[in-house]
Amino acid sequence: MRVLGIDASLRSTGYGIVESRSGRLAAGERGIVRNAGSLAHSACLLRIRREIVAVLARARPDVAALEGGFHFRNARTALVLGEVRGVVIAACAEAGVAVYEYAPRHIKQSLTGFGAADKSQVSKMAMSVLGLDEKPPEDAADALATAICHHQSHSGIAALRPKPI
């Protein structure tokens, strides 16, 4: 199974492919869609959509895994993230790729055993699981962690598997 993990953000959307090969997880293409602060909001959304569509076409994942929303103190931040997530979900739907959503605590728990782990702990565990020699950029590491979480969630009892959104 090939999973596209996505860490959605307006200015720095991370993505990463994680594939199961002979019972082991391996990292494929990974990167970040960066948008300059000077770029208009609508142009950022369009750029994210185009880049995710291109990754979907190149990598041909079986499914996508997206970090779910969490409690925001700032309504504007929640709205912007919702727009980015909508663009990503629509791009995946257009490509026929089911999207699964995971809570941030669940992703951290599945990689480190601790739901409140910090980003560096999650990144180190993602590197270890995938056998990476160098640390990927933070947002790409978060995307890889989300994809690993999906693999782990689908390796157990079928009745407990999450449903696509």
Image (spheres, rainbow, N blue to C red):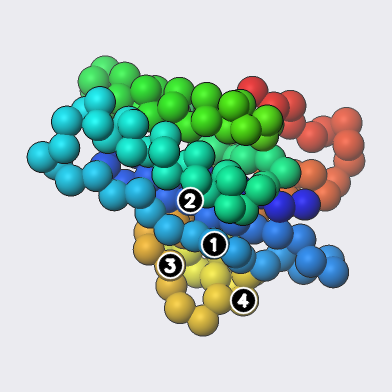
Q: Gap between marks 1 and 3, in whole Å? A: 11 Å
Quadrant of residue 84 within the rendered picture: top left
Discs 1, 2 touching: Cβ within 8 Å: yes
Q: Is residue 50 above or below residue 4?
A: above
State which quadrant residue 72 falls in.
top left
* Residue at x-position 63% and y-position 69%: 130
Specify few, some or many for label 4: CA neighbours under 10 Å numbering under 14, 14-19, or 20 or more: few
Within 10 Å of the Cα at label 1, are there few (<14), some (14-19), or many (20+) other Cα atoms?
A: some
Which residue is nearer to you in this view: 65 or 41?
41
Indicate which label's residue lies in the foreground, 4 or 1. 1
Residue 41 falls left or right of residue 99: left
Disc number placed over residue 131 in the picture, else none: 4
Q: Position of residue 71 (x, y in %)?
A: 39, 25
Q: Pointer 2: residues within 10 angstroms few (<14), some, or many (20+)?
A: many
Circle 2/circle 4 CB separation < 8 Å: no
The amino acid type, in three-letter code, at marker 4 is Gly
Look at mark 1 in the image and give the residue it sits on: 29
Front disc: 1 or 2? 1
Q: Is residue 123 left or right of residue 153?
A: left
* Distance (Cα) linking label 1 and label 2: 8 Å
**Cα distance in 3D space between marks 3 and 4:** 12 Å
The residue under label 2 is 15
Q: How far across and down, in percent of the image, does residue 147 sit?
A: 61, 50
Give the residue displayed 54% in from the left and 70% down from the top: 127
Q: Earlier in the sequence, mark 1 or mark 3?
A: 1
Please indicate whether residue 105 sits to the left or right of residue 150 in the image.
left
